[in-house]
Image (spheres, rainbow, N blue to C red):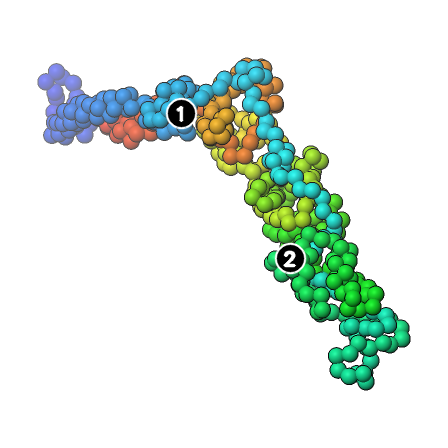
Amino acid sequence: MGKGARPSACGRKPKRNYCPLFDRDAKALRSQAASLSRPLSMYLKKIVCLALFPGLAGCATLPSSGPTGKQIERSAIAPKDGSPIRLVQIQSATGIPVAPDIAKPVASLPEITQTPTDMVGPGDVLDINIYEAGVTLFSGGGNSGGSGQMMATPGVQVQKLPPMRVDDGGDITIPYAGTLNVAGLTTGEVEAMIRNALKGLSQNPQVLVALDQAITNSIIIGGEVAKPGRLVLQTNRESLSDVIALAGGYRGSSKDLMVRIMRGASSADVRINDMVENPALDVRIRPGDRLMLVDDPRTYSILGASGRVEQVPFRRSSVSLAEAVATAGGTNPNLGDPAAIFLFRYVRDESGNEVPVVYHLNMMQTGSYFLAQKFVMQDKDVLYFGNAAANQPSKLVQLISQLFSPVLTVTSAVSVIQNSNN
């Protein structure tokens, strides 16, 4: 036994650098950590339980892009407020709504009898020339015979009257002939009327009448055209496309332009793209019509659990439901339910009132893809992709893991401390 070493009670050598005081303090620290960790772990478990109960009770209030298909059907059939909404199941061709007749508004315009191109009416400005031979009433040489006397000169004399505007009552005033009502007459009939009125006052007068400014035989065109303003119809056989071309053509994209034709108290709307594809819409324009080209793009909205949520413009005159679903990117595989494709639309009933209608299409059935090709989209339709009901539990688990990841981190840290002290 070495010098200075003290034998132990059992005859074994003590450990090197052994300190009884340090051993006693270490045991006390481990005991305190264990006593602290037990209440902390119990406290954390209570917090987790208390937080789980409201989460389980509130599954319906989890973040979502919209209702499920079943929820839409229940709220449509038995809404909490208002009357029930009509729900149409698209399972056959009979359930597809009939596309509106785009030519119907044009057919409702009153038909106007074709009028002559030289008809005179209020506002027109007439150019009148009176020709006289022999004894003249309106023109002549000097006044050698005295003032106010008719003059006999060789040859033919012509008198051009100042521009004559037809007043609101359709009258004009001719010297020596008085007031004449010319509204509704052609220029040839006005010539005969003036000539008859001057008989007995002039020797065989001849009259020529021309339209200097035509108001009666014109239309007004405005809006998205190159040259808006008054347009004179030269033949009275011009169609809608003709007058647009005569006004310099339209501005903007044809798919977004709509022409409003106003005829008296009636009006009709025609889209440029529809007119190009359907010649029946290229109607005959009549004098007095007013045309307005308006930038009015047609759109439909995409909502719910789709690949994209936005407002989509029509790229052509006709867009099918299948094309709209494809434009939306289809159903989101992580959120949506292909069996819950809905289209919301206002439809006019027999009384002309707008009523809401919901169309349901189950894209899990093969026949639905053919039906979707025949279903025509309309302006301001809402295409909705329903949420899958099975997504709610996964969302809850996701939410819980996000909420309690800090708590689990603390618990793990306490376990590490306990293991290191043991």
Query: Residue visible at 61% across and 36% down?
Result: 108
Image quadrant in which the N terminus is located: top left
Determine whether the residue tagged by mark 1 lies in a helix, strand or loop. Answer: loop
Q: What residue would you read off at disc 2?
A: 170
- Residue at 64% in and 49% down: 288
Give the farthest residue toward the front.
Answer: 200
Please identify the quadrant where the C terminus is shown. Answer: top left
Q: Height in image: 259 above or below 133?
A: above
**Badge 1 amino acid:** Pro
Q: Which of marks 2 and 1 is nearer the N terminus?
A: 1
- Rounded to the nearest whole Å, what is the CA distance between mark 2 and mark 1? 67 Å
Tell me if mark 2 has few (under 14), some (14-19) or many (20+) residues whose alpha carbon lies within 10 angstroms of its own: some
Q: Could you tell me residue 202's position as x and y percent? A: 80, 69
Q: In this view, does 41 lie to the left or right of 201?
A: left
Which residue shows up at 42% across the image and 23% down it? 85
Residue 288 visible? The answer is yes
